[in-house]
Amino acid sequence: MVLLGASLVTAAVPAVAAPEAAPAAATACPTGWGSTDKAAAAATSESVRNVRTGRHDCYDRMVVDVPGAARGDLGYSVRYVDRLLQDGSGRHIPVSGGAILEVRVTAPAYDPETGAATYPARAGGVLPGVDLTGYRTFRDARFAGSFEGDTQLGLGVRGRLPFRVQQLDGRLVIDVAHTWTGTAAR
């Protein structure tokens, strides 16, 4: 009997609506990166050791780790291409997405003295340890190869979007914007 009475009292209490959450403020995103080719002439004998990716409010990021390379010694070429063609052989490497960014880093993915691989990727294969599930812009990431001291990657993106490249000590950073508008869509 007591239990039944408690249930009735609980049922008789009116429900109180939770207060509405304040709308999320739009994130202001960097603009002006453009989608034209970007390059820096330099080279290092330090080796590529890893490639990783990350998601941000305004862009998706790829980082090529080249420990020991100084910022000024880390050269690159990043550009949109119609097809990713492997250096040396000219073999077509299929990359999924609405557009393909070819990323060339002037650092080998092998030890220059022994020829042993320093980054465990296979030509034409997806980048080891890179999972692009849930990314807004990135669709695919492929290893094209490392030839004559240059490492070549293919980055499949949703469309031909603006991007920037940053040289930092020990790494090259490629950011591809989610939109052209300069705001983050939620």
Image (cartoon, rainbow, N blue to C red):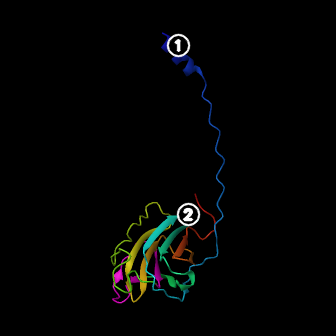
Whichever of callouts 1 and 2 sits on the residue coming sooner in the sequence is 1
**Residue 177 shows which numbered tag?**
none
Identify the residue at horizontal 54%, vertical 72% (top origin): 176
The residue at which mark 1 appears reads as 5
- Counting from the top left corner in percent of width and height, residue 29 is at 63, 66
Which label sits in the foreground, 1 or 2?
2
Identify the residue at horizontal 53%, vertical 16% (top origin): 6
Please give the range of residues in magenta. Answer: 83-106
Looking at the image, residue 110 sits to the left or right of residue 1; the answer is left
Mark 2 crowd level (few <14, some 14–19, many ≥20, 10 Å Cα): few
Front in this rendered view, residue 111 or 162: 111
Q: Picture quarter containing residue 89?
A: bottom left
Q: Is residue 17 visible?
A: yes
Looking at the image, residue 164 sits to the left or right of residue 96; the answer is right
- Counting from the top left corner in percent of width and height, residue 98 is at 46, 73
Q: Secondary structure at mark 2?
A: loop
- Counting from the top left corner in percent of width and height, residue 62 is at 49, 71
Query: Which kind of residue does numbered mark 2 sit on?
Result: His
Front in this rendered view, residue 164 or 5: 164
Front in this rendered view, residue 169 or 12: 169
- Counting from the top left corner in percent of width and height, residue 174 is at 53, 74
Front in this rendered view, residue 53 or 50: 50
Q: Secondary structure at mark 1?
A: helix
Identify the residue at horizontal 35%, vertical 83% (top origin): 92
The stretch drawn in magenta includes residue 119: no
- Say above or below: 136 vs 49: above
The residue at which mark 2 appears reads as 56
